[in-house]
Image (cartoon, rainbow, N blue to C red):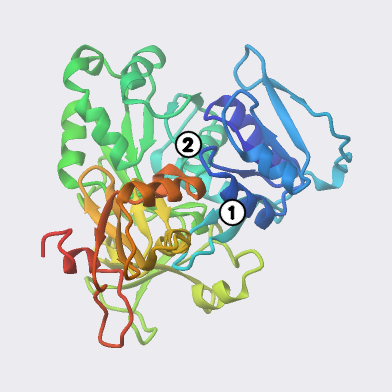
Amino acid sequence: VAIVLPNGPDLGMLFLASACFATAAPLNPSYSKNEFLFFLKDLGARLLVVDPSIRSSASLAAQELSIPVIHLLKNDKAGEFRLKTDTKLLAVPNKLSHHEGKTALLLHTSGTTSTPKLVPLTASNLMQSAQNIGSTLQLSAKDICLNIMPLFHIHGLVAVFLSSILFQGRLICSPGFNALTFFKLLKEYTPSWFSGVPTMHQAILQRAEKNQEIIKFNSLRFIRSSSAALPAPVLEDLENTFKCPVIEAYGMTEASHQIASNQLPPQIRKSGIVGVAAGPEIRIIGDDGNDLPINCVGEILIRGKNVIKNYSNNPEADRNSFYNDWFRTGDLGALDQDGYLKICGRIKEIINKGGEKISPKEIDDILQEISAINQVVCFGISDNKYGEEIGCAIVLKDGTRLDEQEVIAHASKYLAKFKIPKKFVFLDEIPKGATGKIQRIGLAKKIGLENA
């Protein structure tokens, strides 16, 4: 069941129902029609549920693929809705109801190639991760969570939604993150915690000065941060502003989110460190595949009940992503003497823009369709707001002309807004490595878009 809905309680409830009785596949409503065509086809979607009141090309893509479309009609009560369709649907047999080994959730995650990988997460994966998160955060029925994360990402679905339900807490499903309304929600619902990405925390801090009275009486027990590295000054400012601990965690889709996490006081929290193993086992290996000593940087491997055993229909990805029964995260890190994990970089060339994982080759392939372009390479650029922004180096064919606005206009037809490059540079030649290959990593510095 593919789901394209705005953030809120209806999306949460439909995800939960679909995950129990079928397989849920929530998608970003901002995708372009071409992206919806790819994702719906790759998912093998049997149904698409949409909110007819939002602007989305999902229904057009589904109709093109002959996938039945169901309209979600809202009621006044949160999480209560009606489903309407003009298409005759097959009844769902009872045998499809929940069991631990069933694929409950399908999510795509970008790899280093232009084709995103499809991650099948079982009910067991999801519930184990929700259990790990709730235990780490010491959640209980007394807690109230304010959800500002999108519920089409693993962070919002598991770290916030499922963990709150599993530990019987109250959950406030906002329409999505808005720094202008955050403090009103904080005052109205008196949450005990919320989880966000660093860019959200930075936006909240920017409006803190104008909301001192609400902050003074805030009810937060802790603040959680994940999906991208949280700068140490931001963590410090958050703690000083809200007078509560900030818990930084490390996760990924293939691990049903949480891998490592800092702990609540009185246990030790280390700034710039993503904490101790908080569910799966963690090991660091060198190029030879052997474990490395403490404080030595190598590839991060994980295994556990919340970690996938394989991708969907992708034997090549399986071969590259697993080392015996361990999953290769593609990240570089080191464990210190206390077992705390430090993330030192990414092996993969994925651009991490505010928690959105973007494949640069996917953008390359779209822009390469422009007839005036001879060569194009997209890459990550350090950015204070998003962590990384998207840069784009272009070599034009002789005798042709092209400007940034024309490139953006073409990209906008096929890509979601967050995937469109911000900085462009037109070159006579793109720098290459010793073997003649173009190297994305470090390219921003080589062409002068970052300080050397």
Of all residues shown, which one is farthest toward the front? 399
In percent of width and height, residue 59 lies at 68, 37
Q: Viewed as shown, does residue 404 lie left or right of 166?
A: left
As helix, strand or loop, the secondary structure at mark 2 comes to loop
Of all residues shown, which one is farthest toward the left? 452
Q: Residues within 10 Å of mark 2 (few under 14, many from 20)?
A: many
Task: Identify the residue at horizontal 52%, vertical 52% (top origin).
Answer: 256
Residue holding disc 1: 125
Residue holding disc 2: 150
Q: CA distance from mark 2 to mark 1?
A: 20 Å
Task: Identify the residue at horizontal 34%, vertical 63% (top origin).
Answer: 400
User: Eyeballing the image, is 313 above or below 197?
Assistant: below
User: Eyeballing the image, is 142 above or below 308?
Assistant: above
Observer-side mark, 2 or 1, equals 2
In percent of width and height, residue 223 lies at 31, 34
Amino acid type of the residue that numbered disc 1 sits on in the rendered structure: Asn
Q: Residues within 10 Å of mark 1 (few under 14, many from 20)?
A: many
Task: Identify the residue at horizontal 48%, vertical 62% (top origin).
Answer: 369
Q: Quadrant of the C terminus?
A: bottom left
**Which residue occupies the foreground of this view, 102 or 292?**
102
Amino acid type of the residue that numbered disc 2 sits on in the rendered structure: Pro
Q: Quadrant of the N terminus?
A: top right
Q: Viewed as shown, does residue 332 lie left or right of 211?
A: right
Q: In terms of image quadrants, where is residue 397?
A: bottom left
In percent of width and height, residue 27 lies at 57, 43
As helix, strand or loop, the secondary structure at mark 1 comes to helix
Q: Is residue 19 visible?
A: no
Q: Is residue 378 visible?
A: yes
User: Eyeballing the image, is 326 above or below 188?
Assistant: below
Q: In terms of image quadrants, where is residue 195?
A: top left
Task: Identify the residue at horizontal 54%, vertical 74% (top origin).
Answer: 325
